[in-house]
Image (cartoon, rainbow, N blue to C red):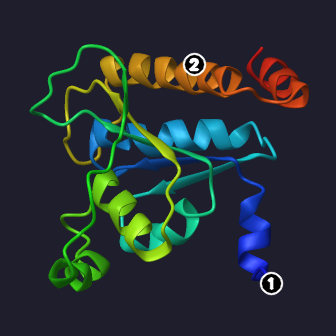
Amino acid sequence: MRSTPTLKAVAQSRFLIIGYGDELKGDEAVGPQVANTVGDWQLPAVKTMSVPQLTPQLVNDIVVTDYAIFVAACSTQSYARTVQLDPIVIGGTLPNRLLPAALTNTHDCNALTLLNLTHQLYGRIPQAWLLQVPTEQFDFGKSLSATAQRGCDRAVRTIEQFFKTYQQPDWMNQSIFAKSA
């Protein structure tokens, strides 16, 4: 079977970190900030993406990875006081009548929808987690609150530990230690 060039290039990324949130709305920028920090490590088996919102176009990156972590500010309903890393489990497929809407509707797109869509379109999905960071404020033009900054630091350490836990080759562990020291 012949692979497309895109799949070959991206297939080397065992890990996909997608940080999402509006960087102009205070603490909502915490997801992109975490993804950018991990991206600065320049680990060869890790692809990071910083996006304002989740969209169906991300399916092409999700399908070719082994592990995906979606990083976002905690929703106002959760009131989390600490960083939370929770597995995302898909339950079935999207009904055929909803597939066109899932491909075009970016306002209701979330990690679970993207994973279901990936599974339905390609028949596979990576193991996936949602990493939520505690937040306080979402005012336009504000920087991260102290709560979100502490959460960002803890989220980065959580991802570092995640890489170590998921049986990485020695080069990755050495790279993380060297770059985070």
Name the amino acid, label 1.
Arg
Q: Position of residue 171 (x, y in %)?
A: 90, 29
Name the amino acid, label 2.
Arg
In primary-sequence order, the first of circles 1 and 2 is: 1
Q: Secondary structure at mark 1?
A: loop
Residue 81 lies left or right of residue 45; in this view the side is: left
Image quarter of residue 86: top left
Asked whether residue 90 is in view, the answer is yes
Q: On the image, numbered disc 2 is attached to which residue?
A: 157
Residues at marks 1 and 2, CA–CA distance in whole angstroms: 38 Å
Name of the residue lying farthest toward the left: 77
Image quarter of residue 104: bottom left
- Residue drawn at x 65%, y 20% is 165
Considering the image in quadrants, where does the N terminus appear? bottom right
Residue 60 lies left or right of residue 43; in this view the side is: left
Q: Position of residue 55 (x, y in %)?
A: 36, 68
Q: Secondary structure at mark 2?
A: helix
Observer-nearest residue: 3 or 142?
Answer: 3
Work out whether 136 lies above or below 13: above
> Dot 1: few (<14), some (14–19), or many (≥20) neighbours within 10 Å?
few
Mark drawn on residue 2: 1
